[in-house]
Image (cartoon, rainbow, N blue to C red):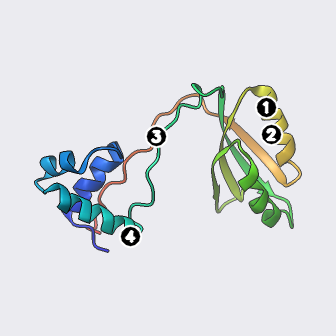
């Protein structure tokens, strides 16, 4: 799907506030609410808009640590890990990557003891490198229009 300038404007608004009304978006970009709704529906159907979600403060819900954990899987342990990782409640995001490690995860933890126990669960699958997140520099930045025009 080629995303025109109006669709990009709609996407920019929804990335800033997914609950913004179609009427409000329409006023800002010069479309009627039904026209905005039709464009949004089409982008949802085509998979351009994947989902809507709430951003939750991990600290305010009881987690004190956020960490990035990289895992280099032992021979024969990657596939079992890919199944197991989906069951860990600590894992917020998990990516299979290229390079020395196979996996990079973003996790939230109650405290250092929780981190230690979580790492103990991981080390049967591979070698781990853990990085504690100190602060967010950029988070959930909106995806902008590709300079090539796509």
Q: Quadrant of the C terminus?
A: bottom left
Q: Are marks 2 and 4 in contact (CB under 8 Å)?
A: no
- Camera-near label (3 vs 1) is 1
Q: Which mark is residue 31?
A: none
Q: Which mark is residue 139?
A: 3
Q: Are marks 1 and 2 in contact (CB under 8 Å)?
A: yes
Q: Which of the 4 quarters of the picture holds residue 135?
A: top right
Q: Are marks 4 and 3 in contact (CB under 8 Å)?
A: no
Q: How many marks?
A: 4
Q: Which of the 4 quarters of the picture holds residue 131?
A: top right
What residue does disc 1 label?
114
Up-down: is 34 above or below 54? below
Marks 4 and 3, Cα distance to the nearest angstrom?
Answer: 26 Å
Badge 2, how many Cα within 10 Å: few under 14, some, many 20+?
some
What residue does disc 4 label?
45
Q: Is residue 99 left or right of residue 46?
A: right
Q: Earlier in the sequence, mark 3 or mark 1?
A: 1
Marks 3 and 2, Cα distance to the nearest angstrom?
Answer: 24 Å
- Camera-near label (4 vs 3) is 4
Residue 74, horizontal then vertical, whole percent: 85, 60
Marks 3 and 1, Cα distance to the nearest angstrom?
Answer: 24 Å
Residue 50, horizontal then vertical, whole percent: 44, 60
Q: Earlier in the sequence, mark 2 or mark 4?
A: 4
Name the residue furthest front.
Answer: 34
User: What SS does tag 2 mark?
Assistant: helix
Marks 2 and 4, Cα distance to the nearest angstrom?
Answer: 38 Å
Q: Earlier in the sequence, mark 1 or mark 4?
A: 4
């Amino acid at each position: 799907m080629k995303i025109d300038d109006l669709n990009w404007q709609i996407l920019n608004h929804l990335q800033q506030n997914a609950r913004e009304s179609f009427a409000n978006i329409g006023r800002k970009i010069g479309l009627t609410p039904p026209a905005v709704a039709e464009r949004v529906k089409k982008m949802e159907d085509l998979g351009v808009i994947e989902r809507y979600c709430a951003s939750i403060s991990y600290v305010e819900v009881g987690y004190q640590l956020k960490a990035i954990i990289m895992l280099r899987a032992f021979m024969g342990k990657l596939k079992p890990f890919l199944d197991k990782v989906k069951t860990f409640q600590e894992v917020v995001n998990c990516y299979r990557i290229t390079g020395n490690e196979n996996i990079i995860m973003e996790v939230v933890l109650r405290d250092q003891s929780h981190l230690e126990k979580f790492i103990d669960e991981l080390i049967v699958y591979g070698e781990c490198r853990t990085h504690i997140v100190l602060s967010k520099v950029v988070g959930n930045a909106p995806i902008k229009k590709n300079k090539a025009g796509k």
